[in-house]
């Protein structure tokens, strides 16, 4: 090695060694069971949360009225990807009911769910959900009985989490529900609820 590159490498190594304490203190350390950015991100790492939400379910198929959608959610604090970015894994159960000119229709969904949250402030986080699961769809026709079908469902949507207290969050989201049976798309808007962790 010539003297010039060897001298440059020694300088680079010295700068890297001197920068280690500064870089280490710049990244907040998050121990298991603590919060990285605040209560708005839901459960602590390795912790769990439960949420109940309600909203209006807007159907795309013709002939169906707007109906209620009720959702229960369980989430596990999976990982802090950065000090402000969190990944949670869980499941959602939801039930929606619609009146129709031919009778009625209800949907029951069971969907494993991945959520990514980004902390805006310690009390406010934005999140996105993505899940693929199963849905039971039951359609009753006036005077002709009913039919039940089990189909795949794909769900996604953005949301906001606001920490009301260290263990209680207010959630507001829009949820897009796609069904593979040709039953169309249902949009749950607005969906509002509470998360306990």
Image (tube, grey):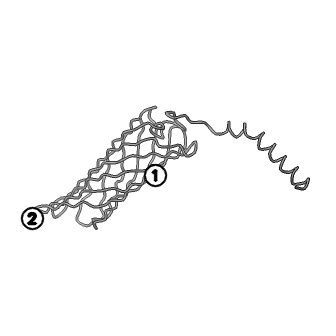
Helix, strand or loop under label 1:
strand
Q: Residue at x 39, y 36 (%)?
A: 196
Q: Which residue is mark 2?
A: 144
The percent coordinates of residue 40 (x first, y second) are 48, 39
The C terminus sits in image quarter: top left
Task: Give the left or right position of residue 109, taking residue 104 as reference.
Answer: right
**What is the tally of numbered marks visible in this picture?**
2
* Closer to the camera in the image, 135 or 10: 10
As drawn, which residue projects farthest toward the left?
143
Cα–Cα gap, marks 1 and 2 = 41 Å
Mark 1 surroundings within 10 Å by alpha-carbon count, few (fewer than 14), some (14 through 19), many (20 or more): some
Q: Which residue is mark 1?
A: 128
Q: Residue at x 29, y 47 (%)?
A: 70
The percent coordinates of residue 139 (x first, y second) are 18, 60
As drawn, which residue projects farthest toward the top?
166
| Figure check: 153 above or below 16 | below
As drawn, which residue projects farthest toward the front?
1
The N terminus sits in image quarter: bottom right
Helix, strand or loop under label 2:
loop
| Figure check: 102 above or below 10 | below
Task: Give the left or right position of residue 74, taking residue 68 as reference.
Answer: right
């Amino acid at each position: 090695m010539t003297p010039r590159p060897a001298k440059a490498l020694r300088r680079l190594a010295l700068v890297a060694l001197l920068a280690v304490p500064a870089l280490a203190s710049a990244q907040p350390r998050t121990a298991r069971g603590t919060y990285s950015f605040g209560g708005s991100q839901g459960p602590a790492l390795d912790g769990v949360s439960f949420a109940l939400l309600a909203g209006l379910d807007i159907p795309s198929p013709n002939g169906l009225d707007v109906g209620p959608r009720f959702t229960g959610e369980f989430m596990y604090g999976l990982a802090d990807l950065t000090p402000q970015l969190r990944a949670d894994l869980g499941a959602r159960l939801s039930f929606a009911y619609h009146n129709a000119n031919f009778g009625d229709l209800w949907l029951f969904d069971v969907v494993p769910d991945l959520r990514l949250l980004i902390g805006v402030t310690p009390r406010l986080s934005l999140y996105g959900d993505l899940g693929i699961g199963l849905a039971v769809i039951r359609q009753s026709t006036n005077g002709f009985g009913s039919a039940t079908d089990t189909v795949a469902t794909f769900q996604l949507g953005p949301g906001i989490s606001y920490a009301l207290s260290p263990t209680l969050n207010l959630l507001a989201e829009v949820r897009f529900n796609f069904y593979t049976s040709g039953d169309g798309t249902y949009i749950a808007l607005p969906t509002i609820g509470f998360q306990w962790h």
